[in-house]
Amino acid sequence: TVQNMLSDLLTANGFNEILSNSLTKSSYSDDLDSAVKILNPLSSDLDVMRQSLLYSGLEAIAYNQKRRSPDLKLYEFGKVYSIGEEKYNEVQRFSVFISGAMQGEEWNAKPKPASFYNIKAIVDGLLQKLNVKDFTVADAEGTELAYGLQYNRGNKTLVKFGAVATPALKKADVDKEVFYADFNFDVLLNIARKNKIVYKEVSKFPSVRRDLSMLIDKSVTFEQIKQVAQKTERKLLQDVNVFDVYEGDKLPAGKKSYAVSFVLQDAEKTLTDKAIDAIMQKLIFNLGKEAGAEIRK
């Protein structure tokens, strides 16, 4: 199953699965009006159904940190509950947590603390495993994250991830930074069911890389650059990557510099310099027109 496949991938990368109670405390809720309340709770710590997997993970992290086990990589599959439009809602979610050091102390290396890019790499790897593509990237919405991103497809959010906000950490008595990803597992399952495995021969012809250095507004994101490039050349463009970013006083106010690589490949023939130059000229024109990019020479 999809759940077993994702579990195997995370466990192979050093993660531990947690299973927590669906009952939790109402003080964790940011919206009590939509919470499913227990009519006869056993205690104030178990008076509502959970609306998020965030706090069950934070409680596990707090428990371990207090017992001198601060370096944690956890994941959980579970349901969350709410009331909306006069009916009860039950949604399957999937969460990933990273806290402490990604690499422990060794004689020849210092511990490497977890960062936003570690959780992003995990999210991207899981989506790649499920062959989930064609999503848009935006800043994460909501109060649970101090900063982060969310991946959307249409009007549905596939995943939100980033650094957990300080108020949420304090509620669970966690004193170290935590990076968290929250997947809408129901949506991912629907996408994964529609995937078809297609086999194709590895191209016998070489790929070609071309780099562009460009000056753009600080408000322009790499995702916008990537989308313009993919719209410009759908067939031959295999990969787009930013390998250098510069912001400093040597540039005009409100500007930043990106160095972006473009990998081109034709599965049927070797690309000629003339064909490559024509594609790059189209890219330069469209990047300037749609993203306001000024190519630096």
Image (cartoon, rainbow, N blue to C red):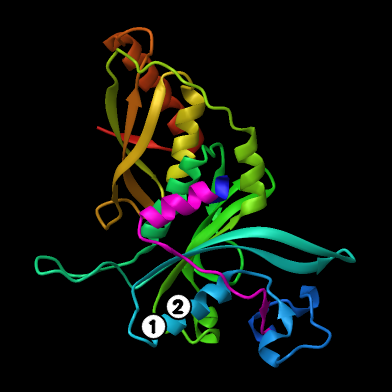
- Quarter-wise, where is residue 35 in the image? bottom right
- Magenta residues? 4-25
Whether the residues at callouts 1 and 2 have beta carbons within 8 Å, the answer is yes
Question: Residue 46 in the image: x percent, y percent?
Answer: 69, 85
- Quarter-wise, where is residue 261 in the image? top left
Q: Amino acid at mark 1?
A: Gln
Residue bearing the label numbered 1: 65
Going 39% across and 26% down the picture, which residue do you hit?
238
Q: Amino acid at mark 2?
A: Ile
- Is 291 situated left or right of 208 in this image? right
- Quarter-wise, where is residue 114 in the image? bottom left
Q: CA distance from mark 1 to mark 2?
A: 6 Å
Is any atom of residue 254 visible in this view?
no
Residue bearing the label numbered 2: 61
Q: Quadrant of the C terminus?
A: top left
* Helix, strand or loop status at disc 1: helix
Question: Residue 179 in the image: x percent, y percent?
Answer: 44, 67
Going 71% across and 59% down the picture, which residue do you hit?
91
Going 90% across and 66% down the picture, which residue do you hit?
86
